[in-house]
Image (tube, rainbow, N blue to C red):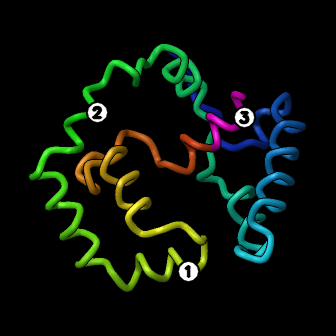
Amino acid sequence: MIKPFKTYAESNFLAPFIENLKIKVKEDLKNKVPEEYIESIFSSPQLTYLPNIMIKSLTWKETELPYSQFLENERIERAKAFIEENKTLLEDIEFVFDVEKEVIVAIFLVETDLGKKTGNFPVINVFYSLALSG
C-alpha cells in the first residue's frame, strides 16, 4: 500500500508542482479569497498528498454509473428542500463565486448525496492530490 506524505515538506520532489499549484490557485481566487488564507492552507500540516487518489482516479469508471438515479423524484425533492433549508448560505456562495445555487446543489447531490456520503479522505486532500497528479 502506498503511504500518504504527512506534509508537502516531506515530499521534496513535489515542491515545484506544489508551488505552481499555489500560484494557479492564487490567480484563480484573486479578489475572492485572501492570499494569507491560501498560504495558510498550503502550509497546513493537515494538507496531505494521497498517491492512491491518482490511482483510483485512473481506474474509476464514472461513465458506468447510473446517472438517471439523480433525476428520481425523491432526490429532486430532497435537493429542493436542501436549497430551501440552506437558502441564505447558498445565496451568499452564489454571490461570491457567481455560481447558481441550483448548480451547487446538483453537484453536491451527485458527489455526496447531499452530505450523506462524505468519503474516507478530507476533500481538500483529495483535490490537492488530484491537482498534483495532473
Q: Nearer the viewer, residue 124 or 97?
A: 97
Please give left or right for residue 50 compared with residue 40 in the image.
left
- Magenta segment main secondary structure: helix
Q: Give residue 14's position: percent from left, percent from top.
A: 81, 33
Query: Label 2: few (<14), some or many (≥20) within 10 Å?
Result: few
Above-or-below relation of 59 to 69: above
Q: Nearer the viewer, residue 15 or 56?
A: 56
Is 130 in the magenta? yes
Query: Label 3: few (<14), some or many (≥20) within 10 Å?
Result: some
The residues tagged by marks 1 and 2 sit, at their Cα atoms, a distance apart of: 29 Å
SS at badge 3: helix
Please give left or right for residue 91 compared with residue 109 in the image.
right
Q: Which residue is mark 2?
A: 67
Q: Are marks 1 and 3 in contact (CB under 8 Å)?
A: no
Instruction: Return the disc, 1 or 2, that comes first in the chain's sequence.
Output: 2
SS at badge 2: helix
Residue plotted at (40% across, 24% down):
62
Instruction: Point out the residue furthest to the bottom here.
Output: 88
Above-or-below relation of 91 to 132: below
Q: Of the numbered discs in the image, which one, if any, rests on residue 132? A: 3
SS at badge 1: helix
Q: Which residues are magenta?
A: 128-134
Q: Which residue is mark 1?
A: 95
